[in-house]
Image (tube, rainbow, N blue to C red):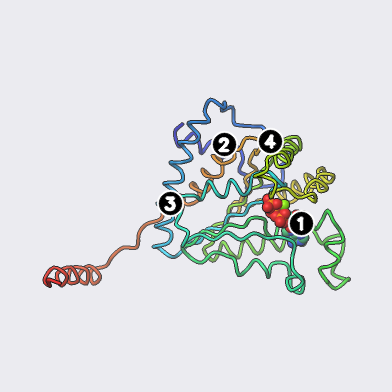
Amino acid sequence: MERDRIYKVLDRYRITKGKKFRLKNVDPKDTYGLGSELKAEAKTLLQEGVRKLAEMQDKLYAQDRWSVLLIFQAMDAAGKDGTIKHVMSGVNPQGCEVASFKAPSSEELDHDYLWRCVPYLPNRGHIGIFNRSYYEEVLVVRIHPELLKVQKLPPQLVTKRIWEERYEDINGFERYLTRNGTVIRKFFLHVSKEEQKKRFLERLTEPEKHWKFSAADVRERAYWDDYMDAYERMIRATATPHAPWFVVPADNKWFTRLVVSAAVFHAMEELDLQYPKVDKRKRAELAEARELLLRTDD
Ligand code: ATP
Ligand code: MG
């Protein structure tokens, strides 16, 4: 499968303007008509993508200007961890950090909700991955009002408009980061309810997957429709050309990984990354160093 074709695949799942977006139009089982006979090819392609991504990351790091922030959101068992692991497997760990956001601590609840994310924003030249993010503030917090209650907000600030206000602030924050050289790509791994059930059952039957299982995850399934509604609203309100959402079908892991890998690759390719140019003075310095090394015996 050639590169242009993959970019077409990306077009289908990239949301840059949310107004018309409907989640029901994305089938979690979708593979863009690519049959599972392409699984092997997808694997090769993914390996190639990983290799090229590593090359680009090296330039990103050397150039030290841009940073890349990848945000992953999904229902449990949609494959966030596996996707992150696979797609980033070739990159230099020195230039890539993953931050996982769980339920906030009491110290975190004593601050605004973006506060805890800021220290984990990627340095220039780095790739930062958010495994869950401030988007939980318009997802789980919207679905469970008791989570909003413990945020200690002044009561007069908690109105019907709070979710709209959060979308607005998140958009402002992402705009700000973009203007400072952070390239943002957001991924919603869209798994179906039945596939989630299948994966939970696997976690229950396979001993090496037991650790991944949490009874709370099963309880959260009862809110499935509320979550889908919250995801749709969130994507409609926060998909922008500079920080697009990719709604990635997640029932087939090989396809999820292919789409995410292509999206990350594409984002970096657009930056036209180059190794820093060596000027005349630096070239002279290098030549001198070389001569010095060759001249001495030890
Ligand atoms: P795993 O695949 O290991 O289960 P996970 O990302 O689901 O990974 P958990 O240890 O289950 O990790 O913790 C994540 C939980 O924290 C989720 O249920 C998520 O909704 C919750 N969470 C994250 N951010 C917030 C937040 N700001 N407020 C409340 N809950 C949050
Ligand atoms: Mg979990």
Q: Which is in the foreground here, disc 1 or disc 4?
A: 4
Percent across and percent down for residue 279 are 27, 67
Of helix, strand and loop, which one carries label 2? helix
Find the distance from the CA under tag 4 to the CA under tag 2: 13 Å
**In what quadrant of the picture does the C terminus appear?**
bottom left
Residue highlighted by disc 3: 54
For label 2, the residue is 254
State how far apart marks 1 and 2 are (Cα). 29 Å
Tell me the residue that label 4 is attached to. Answer: 28
Question: Counting other residues with Cα less than 10 Å from the Cα at mark 4, is it few (<14), some (14-19), or many (20 or more)?
Answer: many
Residue found at the far front of this picture = 207
Kindly identify which numbered label has been placed on residue 138: 1
Instruction: Specify the amino acid type for callout 2.
Output: Trp
Q: Residue at x 51, y 66 (%)?
A: 123
- The answer to which of 266 and 188 lies nearer the viewer is 188
**Residue found 71% across the figure and 60% down from its top:** 102
| Mark 4 or mark 2, earlier in chain | 4
Q: Is mark 3 within 8 Å of ligand 1?
A: no
**Displayed quadrant of residue 263:** top right
